[in-house]
Image: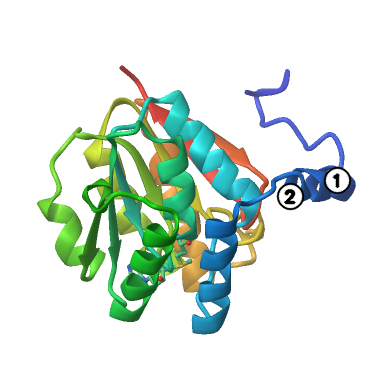
Amino acid sequence: MTDSEGGPHPPTASPDSALIDYAESAIVEDDALLAARDRADELGASAVAPAVGALLALLARTCDAHAVVEIGTGVGVSGLWLLNGMAADGVLTTIDPEPEHHRAARQSFAGADIAPGRTRLINGAPRDVLPRLADESYDLVFVDGPLIDHPRHVTEAIRMLRPGGVVVVHNATADGAVADPARTDPPVAAAREAALLIADDERLLPVVIPLGAGVLAATKAR
Ligand SMILES: C[S@@+](CC[C@H](N)C(=O)[O-])C[C@H]1O[C@@H](n2cnc3c(N)ncnc32)[C@H](O)[C@@H]1O
């Protein structure tokens, strides 16, 4: 969207922190999610904020997700939220290079009584694993690996996404640093490059959502 001069609209106001605080605190997690968060703390692993998890579940439900790919399993917090929103027979394929994280994620999924057939945990580097996943076959792809890898992961996500599917990128704004032209350090440059890959793809309809570490979501034209 542009203003009358053809440029982007300036922000109308600074972010309302009370509104963001409310959005972040309005989500209540169940015991399985709270146990998974404890596991994340024990391992020093990070996990999506509850409001981002709820957004993932909402998007998964909205696109009737049966097949989801997650890049960056962690200990399974975002995976549990995705599974909550997916079809009852949907399968989450989730990739992480850290075996310790996958051991913890299996506990998280078992703690929520997720049937083993609903999760496919692939322990390996996404750069090796992703090229083996089929084109245009997944309803939702969630990108939550290191920022520096976002361009490669987003490229693969767009390739794997079926028409009408949704790609979701976590920490897409590098905590807002992408908007500052003075920030050219590699992780911020990578986040910017990934955002441009989405913005410049005419098949995609994107939106930035200021929850958690910043989310960029886009749906692919049918
Ligand atoms: C932010 S955490 C994922 C959190 C998880 N999605 C959640 O919200 O519960 C990032 C994960 O990426 C994994 N990781 C590390 N290097 C990676 C790489 N090169 N590509 C993808 N994931 C990587 C880490 O082991 C870590 O588990």
Quarter of the image for the N terminus: give it.
Answer: top right
Q: Which mark is residue 122?
A: none
The three-letter code of the residue at mark 1 reads: Ser
Query: Residue sitting at 36 percent across and 56 percent down?
Result: 151
- Is 104 situated left or right of 13 in this image? left
Location of mark 1 (residue): 14
Q: Position of residue 134 (x, y in %)?
A: 13, 42
Please determine whether, in this image, residue 182 is positioned above or below residue 169.
Answer: below
User: Which disc number belongs to residue 24?
Assistant: 2
Position of residue 35 in the picture relative to residue 129 (left or right)? right
> Label 2: few (<14), some or many (≥20) within 10 Å?
some
Q: Quadrant of residue 163?
A: top left
Query: Is residue 48 in sight in this rendering?
Result: no
Which quadrant, please, contains the C terminus?
A: top left
- Between residue 187 and residue 50, name the one nearer to us: 50
Query: What colour scheme has been applied to the protein in the rendered image?
Result: rainbow
